[in-house]
Image (cartoon, rainbow, N blue to C red):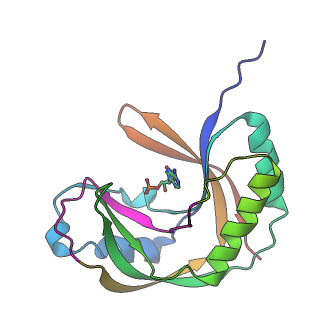
Amino acid sequence: MERIVAERLFFAVWPDTATRAALRASTPPRMRGSGRPTPEEKLHLTVLFLGQMTPAARRCVESAADAVDCQAFTMKLTRIGYFPRSRVLWAGMSEVPESLAALHEALRNGARSCGCEIETHAYAPHITLMRDAPGHFPAPERVDIPWHVRFFALVASRTRPGGTHYETLRTWPLR
Ligand code: 2AM
């Protein structure tokens, strides 16, 4: 009998070179040299976390993604904040941009139509800049980083001895 290997999958958008450089520069000086900064090539924003998916479920969400008809957009990252519980330093925004919310919803509806159980709590888009970040980060800091979003990707997250590895499985252009 064929062994069914489920994979931990998510849809994400990956920043271009300019946005990546701006993100790297956005870590507040007092936080540098501590924690575990996200390597530049791993900086991303999750649009929809899918979790463990069988190959059949993956095929279904890929077909659903084929039918997504969203426009390319530019959004602004305006804040650097801190999640105390997970000790994550993040970049994000105070309100979810409409176009990003539309993409999230289109992918979520597609995943639901495949029978995937998607978490129901509110979508909180963020880019993890640093893990194990030291505390003492009282208030969000303002930044102004434009990000031109032209495509989205289906990504597998794999845990390896050296850390988490992300593999882009497929990308879709936005209109
Ligand atoms: P993180 O950077 O805050 O850990 C792969 O793990 C991606 O999915 C990461 O962007 C991660 O966010 C996000 N992620 C992991 N678990 C998640 C969950 N239960 N719900 C939403 N996003 C999740």
Residue 21 spot, x, y in % from top left: 38, 73
The residue stretch that appears in magenta: 121-138
What residue sits 60% from the left and 52% below the top? 10
Where residue 16 appears, as percent x and y from the top left, is 51, 71
Question: Which of the image's four quarters has the C terminus?
Answer: bottom right
Q: Position of residue 19 (x, y in %)?
A: 45, 76
**Which one is nearer the viewer's eye here, 47 or 154?**
47
Q: Which part of the image, by quadrant, shows the N terminus?
A: top right
Q: Main secondary structure of the magenta part?
A: loop
Specify whether residue 122 is painted magenta.
Answer: yes
At 69% from the left and 71% from the top, the residue drawn is 103
Q: Which x, y percent locates residue 132?
A: 25, 53
Q: Outermost residue toward the top? A: 1
Q: Residue sitting at 71 percent across and 34 percent down?
A: 54
- The quarter of the picture where residue 131 lies is bottom left
Tell me: 175 left or right of 32.
right
